[in-house]
Amino acid sequence: MTSKRFALPLSLVVCLTLAGTGLAKHKKSQSSSTPSGSDFDYYLLTLSWAPEFCATNSSARSSAECASNKHMGLVVHGLWPQYNNGKWPQDCATTPPVASATVEHMMPIMPGSSLIQHEWAKHGTCSGLSADDYFADIEKLYTGLTIPDDFKRPGDAEQTSPGDIEAAFASANSAPKGAFRVSCPKNEFSAVEICLSKDLQYQACPTTVKECRAGKIEVRPVK
């Protein structure tokens, strides 16, 4: 079944506090310190699973996506320019902070002003876009994604395979095989990573994008 879950004030499982998770590390040891503007190969859109972050991160209590009245599932962590070799540009320019109006507009899908500022400074400045256009692209991708029924608001924990999750997302979005990758530290569903061309079309991920090798992983319910 398809439903544009991104249209609702979902969750951005990613408040900058997400840095405490394996996701936030973002392969830190492989990052490139060389600014390169829009010189990159593809985008990686990372959507975190809020129930996992809220249940396992020590700083979750202060995170907007973990508030008891939010009931968040998949949320935007970031849109990252990437190189095919597994590295990426970062901190490509010094710019003013993201405008408060843009921050407020993004909060329903990226609940955390510090996260929004961080993502722009570290990743957005390497996209070759203005801040307004960068966040408009994130919103377009978020609202345009079709979420399979099982991930809209599951009420019970489930055990499933990473391959089944990836196939369900690819099918729901008419995306090529390999465009979606599951992140699963400790064999638990942590995030969906989506590979996109520079013009924001789904594409198969290169082999340098880490794959979840677990046979089965736990998907925590939305509470």
Image (tube, helix red, strand yellow):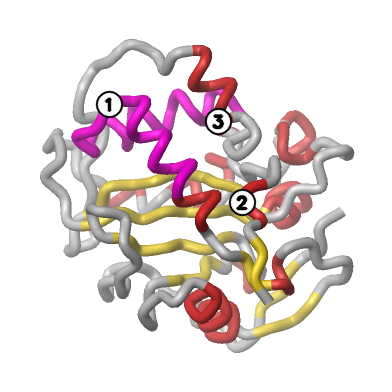
Q: Nearer the viewer, residue 175 or 43?
A: 175
The amino acid type found where label 2 is placed reads Phe
Q: Which residues are magenta?
A: 112-140
The answer to whether residue 20 is above or below residue 130 is below
Real-space Cα separation, disc 3 to disc 1, in angstroms: 15 Å
Where does residue 123 sit, x and y in percent of width and height? 32, 37
Q: Quadrant of residue 176?
A: bottom left
> Left or right: where does residue 176 sit relative to residue 75?
left
Quadrant where the N terminus is found in the figure: bottom right
The mark nearer the N terminus, 1 or 2, is 2
* Residue drawn at x 23%, y 53% as measured from the top left: 198
Does residue 22 show up?
no
Q: Which residue is mark 3?
A: 106
**Label annotation for residue 185:** none
Q: So how many labels did they put on this image?
A: 3
Q: Which residue is mark 1?
A: 130
Report the residue at 82% width, 47% height from top: 71
Residue position marked by numbered label 2 in the rendering:
6
In the rendering, at what x and y percent does residue 177 appear?
38, 83
198 in magenta:
no
